[in-house]
Image (cartoon, rainbow, N blue to C red):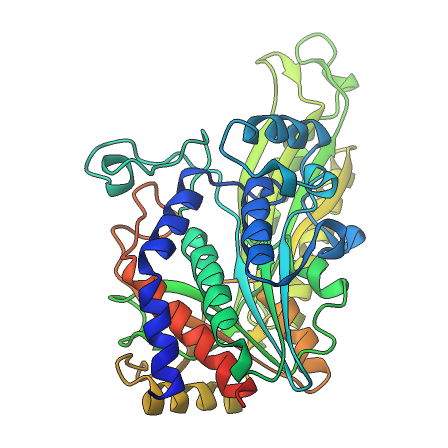
Amino acid sequence: MDMYQTIDKLARSIHEQSVADRRNMHQYPETGWFEMRTSAIIAKRLTELGYEVLTGRQVCDAASRMGVPAKEALEAHYEAIQSQDTPMDYVTEDMREGFTGVIGILRCGDGPVAALRFDIDALPMTENSTTEHRPTREGFASKNPGCMHACGHDSHIAMGLGTAKVLSEIREHLTGTVKLIFQPGEEGARGAKSIAAAGHLEDVDYFAGTHIAPDDTIDDGDITPGTYGSLATTKLDITFRGQAAHAGGFPEKGRSALLAAAHAAVGLAGIPRHSGGMSRINVGTLQAGSGRNVIPDHAFMQVEVRGETTEINTYMEEQARQVCEGAALMTGCSCEITPVGQAPSQVSDLAFVERIKNMIETHLPQYKVSTEYNSRNWGSEDIGFLMERVQAHGGQAVYMRTMTTMASAQHTTEFDLDEKALDKGISVFAAIVFDVMGK
């Protein structure tokens, strides 16, 4: 049997395990830097499959992490996972401190180095609890309040574990090294930069990642081998500080942080757009004030900027900083701006995209390649940090789409997916590795 078809047969043979993995992760979702249980399960499975396993500070550069939760919140979550069937022997002290994520390395002698990336974090959302929602009806809805796998990263984890299993079965047919990167903190663009900064991509010749996507709205196939043009982005937390005072008795003694934030919000919407391409800005939250007759001394905003290129995003960020600092100055307040997430623009290498396209069409014809096989990605994704690092030294990188039917759009409380996509993702990922590393 053709080795590619052997790979597909292996992927399909573990379907029940892949579904179980996905549903396990769906039941116990964890947001960025809280993925302790998730990381422990991944580390345990990879160890059992014979991989060299990196965890904690081995995975992430401490200084490059963004949007890290408070120590107290991390400790509370550590206590919670102890009653969630967590393999605590694999929860390291680093994980307890928020250094989540896992890298599994399979060494198969001399040869090229291939890396695959799977994001593992969930969203701060409350899952639909009605019986119309399949995860609720079938008993695998989220058990973590206010947290949900609403973007499909649970399926990415299952694909990663399945790919690890298939590659371990065919390792005697491979030459080179495989790195499976299970990345924390993709939501909010917080995690990939720290993995890139830790040096894990410096020797990688071929890199691939994917995201599930709806099969009825974007592309017309099973697999889109490449995407390009994701918007670069920066996420900013902005704090204004003023002076509280009685609004009726001594208004002249007050400095309204709320007013500063309001001026900033209006000013941000008025930033001139860039002639070089698309740009975006959004004020997502604004919190201020404690009472009708109190001049607010504190205001907090969550803002994001985006740009068609990294350069345009930098322009938007610089303009946003000037607007906020100016709003603070004109109201007698101070302003603190903290980046909590970042991603560059991302472009797949066309030669590698076409190689994957040809491989699927020739060896896995049961999967249809999308007509637009290198299509525009309109979102933002911090995988760009990993791709840039590979491309900087001459390696090739792609970011794919794995198409599937969805019960509802991503980032909604009713989100669910057709789990047949798991087999497809595992098969294509393992086939890519064999295509570049096969004997």
Q: Quadrant of the N terminus?
A: bottom left
- Relative to 114, is 240 on the left or the right? right
| Residue 370, quarter of the rendered image | bottom left
Image location (x, y in percent) of residue 52: 67, 62
Residue at screen point 34% across, 40% down: 413
Image location (x, y in percent) of residue 304: 58, 52
Q: Is residue 348 visible?
A: no
The correct choice, above or below, for 223 with respect to 385 in the image is below
Image location (x, y in percent) of residue 267: 61, 48
In the foreground, 299 or 380 = 380
- Relative to 200, is 27 on the left or the right? left
Residue at screen point 76% across, 67% down: 199
| Residue 314, quarter of the rendered image | bottom right
Image location (x, y in percent) of residue 133: 24, 40
Q: Is residue 377 visible?
A: yes
In the foreground, 65 or 300 = 65
